[in-house]
Amino acid sequence: MNGGHRGFPAGAGWRTWCRGRRPPVPCLPSPASRLPRRRAAFTLMEMLSVIAIIGLLVGSLALALSKARELSRRARAEAELREMVSAWLQYHQLYGELPSVVQGQNELPSSRKTLDPLINPESGDNPRGLVLLNPQIPFNAAGFYTDPWGTPYQLSFAQPKLEATAALRTSITFPGRQRRLP
């Protein structure tokens, strides 16, 4: 072996032999690589802070979605109310009076029977057979036309007795949100 150490030429240490050349036998590991390696990982505090930040982001997103959903429901309810008021006013313009089902009534629920003259063209109270209201949502199991929160709309028909002038005041409320639209 020519006096060398484990196959290295004599006079050349294994450190000099390994630099830039391929030894006949594998090099011994350098002293720096013999030290125990520290694994790269997150600490518990780092993980908890990341989880807390994610929780805050999810919470703010849920709050924003909740507000958007409430605004959407409110807009839908207002649109449905406008349609119902418009349909009752059209009925009054066409026939000069309200259907017998609702005349002089106060705080009627928006049931299928109440809205029948507007929806059903074959109703006895709708001689021209016109459909004046197309409810976007079907009636619930009890037969009521409900607002987006599930509460039936309340109808009120107050018609004052006037001699020379006819006046019609219609209001529909959705009690779940204490809001009135004239």
Image (spheres, rainbow, N blue to C red):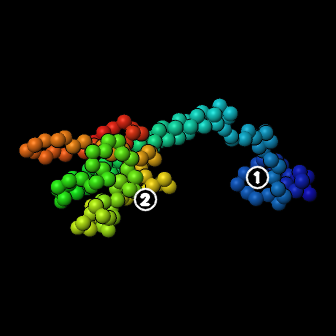
Q: Nearer the viewer, residue 12 or 117?
A: 117
Q: Residue at x 77, y 43 (%)?
A: 33
Query: Picture coordinates of residue 124 (x, y %)?
Result: 30, 64
Q: Earlier in the sequence, mark 1 or mark 2?
A: 1
Q: Amino acid at mark 2?
A: Pro
> SS at mark 2?
loop
Q: Residue at x 15, y 45 (%)?
A: 167
Q: Which mark is residue 138?
A: 2
Q: How many marks?
A: 2
How many neighbours does mark 2 have within 10 angstroms: few (below 14), some (14-19), or many (20 or more)? few
Spatial separation of the CA atoms under disc 1 and disc 2: 85 Å
Q: Which mark is residue 141?
A: none
Q: Residue at x 49, y 41 (%)?
A: 62
> SS at mark 1?
helix
Query: Picture coordinates of residue 11 (x, y %)?
Result: 83, 49
Q: Which mark is residue 18?
A: 1
Q: Nearer the viewer, residue 154 or 50?
A: 154
Query: Picture coordinates of residue 26 (x, y %)?
Result: 82, 56
Q: Nearer the viewer, residue 43 or 122?
A: 122
Q: Nearer the viewer, residue 15 or 30?
A: 30
The quadrant in which the C terminus is found is: top left
Can I make out residue 25 in this image?
Answer: yes
Q: Is residue 106 above or below residue 143?
A: above
Q: Amino acid at mark 1?
A: Cys
Left or right: 69, with 46 as reference point = left
Contact (CB < 8 A) between labels 1 and 2? Answer: no
Left or right: 18, with 77 as reference point = right
Foreground disc of the pair 1, 2? 2
Left or right: 162, with 72 as reference point = left
